Image (cartoon, helix red, strand yellow):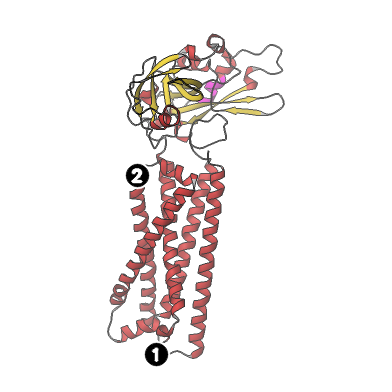
Amino acid sequence: MNAINTSKPMKRFNISVSILSVSIAILALYLLSTAFYSDTQIDNYYQDNGNFYRVETTFNLPNGEKVRSAKSPLPLIDELKKDERIDRVDYIFKLNTTIELQGRKITKVPVFAVSHEFLNTLSPFKKADNTLGANEIYITKDFNNQYLGLEDPKGKSIILDNETYIIKDILERRHDSSLNMDAIISFKPNLIKDYNREIFNWYDTHAYVFIKFTDKNTTFDKNTLLKNIIATKASNLPGAPFTASEFIHLSLKKLKDIHYQDKLPDEIAIGLSKEVIYSSYIAFAFILFSALTNYYNLTSADSSEKRDIYQLKKALGASTFNIIYDSLPTMLVRMVFSTLIFLLLIITIFNTSLYIKNLFYTLETNTLIYLGIFSILIAFILISLIHCSFSLRFYIYQKNRKMDMRYESTFSAWFRKSSLAIQLLVSGISIYLVTGLANQYIHLVDVYTP
């Protein structure tokens, strides 16, 4: 029969490309679900986070240029605290410090001085005592490995800008927080150079300011509040061709959106721009669609080639269910091989792509495993539906045919085999192109990954 006489190399190529198509489909499903779940979970663990905002600053220069910053002027903090519509104000100062330890001096070490209530509301760490003494410091393992190199850092002292600090504990950063902070201390005015002068300086940025509005006041224009503060509290520069309101513009960004990067030069949150994130969804969805389309074409070609076998089984009394059931072991074996290739692909991408590595870092290990199982299950359901659709199509064809089709002409057999060869060629080229596109896209994203 024609199905039996099909060349073995073509069959092997068909099977290989089918397995690769399913592997890429699982990979696309996994990356798509991981990216979406990460995007929805990051910075979403704070209580009542819909009322939390970060204040950002834009300076409108006389020449028309704009200087943007994730930080705000220092005097804004006290003015915000006075407003009854604001429930709380938290802030972070990024300090480039000098650490002295065991006769070594390490310069330009980033340490973050936080407000006293910061750990109660915005802590980026999993577990931490909410009280932090004036000369105590929290660090992470990464900070210790990079700067200190202590075997057991907890309880030991370090000199930070000529002041002695005790390492209170080693903390672990939350995976679902975008705040990139590896060492924090409690804020003190003497940490800021010329603090008594800077407290009146509206024309520079000093701190990352976070505010939470009261629950009962959510209808007023929040940006107007900031404009009024600048208009009434910020003094004009003598002789300047602009007013404070014209030069200083304050804006609000929701806390759960700070991982969307806006190319701010002093950003402390880890993330990507919305454009890159949403284009990732499109790219992964396109790869998934292409892989399933290839698999559909290959299954169509294989089903056409096995039509004579299906007809023989039908003539011997096999039901449509028997035909579907007989194909299940082959489908399961291919699924196992596809899963193994998927695992190999995801390990390779993780070790070569900074974007994928950062994406995985935002989720717990068990969550990544659950998403992997979910992706494999969805892929299995999709390919099962494809197989069932062809079996049902054969059943409908068998039921509605009006003449005996057990034999076909030489021309029909040649045409069917030629179609099979073309489908295999198109499928192989498509897989090659999609894989190349995915590789180039991930490389492009890595270039813009902070």
Pointer 1: what residue?
Answer: 404
Percent position of residue 305, x then y: 43, 80
Percent position of residue 1, x then y: 40, 88
Question: Of marks 2 and 1, which one's residue comes earlier in the chain?
Answer: 2
Percent position of residue 400, x then y: 38, 82
Q: Is 399 rendered above or below residue 367?
A: below
Q: Which of 275/366 is in front?
A: 366
Residue 99 in the magenta stretch? The answer is: no
Three-letter amino acid code at the position of disc 1: Asp
Asked whether residue 221 is in view, the answer is no
Q: Secondary structure at mark 2?
A: helix
Q: Is 168 rendered above or below residue 408?
A: above
Q: Which of 447/254 is in front?
A: 447
Three-letter amino acid code at the position of disc 2: Thr
Q: Which of 431/160 is in front?
A: 160
Give the residues drawn in magenta, as a range. Answer: 222-227
Alpha-carbon span between mark 2 and mark 1: 58 Å
Q: Main secondary structure of the magenta part?
A: helix
- Binning the other alpha carbons within 10 Å of mark 2 as few (below 14), some (14 to 19) or many (20 upward) gives few
Asked whether residue 319 is in view, the answer is yes
- Residue at 55% x, 49% y is 443
- In the displayed structure image, the side of residue 69 where residue 125 appears, left or right: left
Look at discs 2 and 1 and give the one toward the viewer: 2
Task: In the displayed orientation, state which residue is furthest to the top.
Answer: 196
Quadrant housing residue 42:
top left
Pointer 2: what residue?
Answer: 365
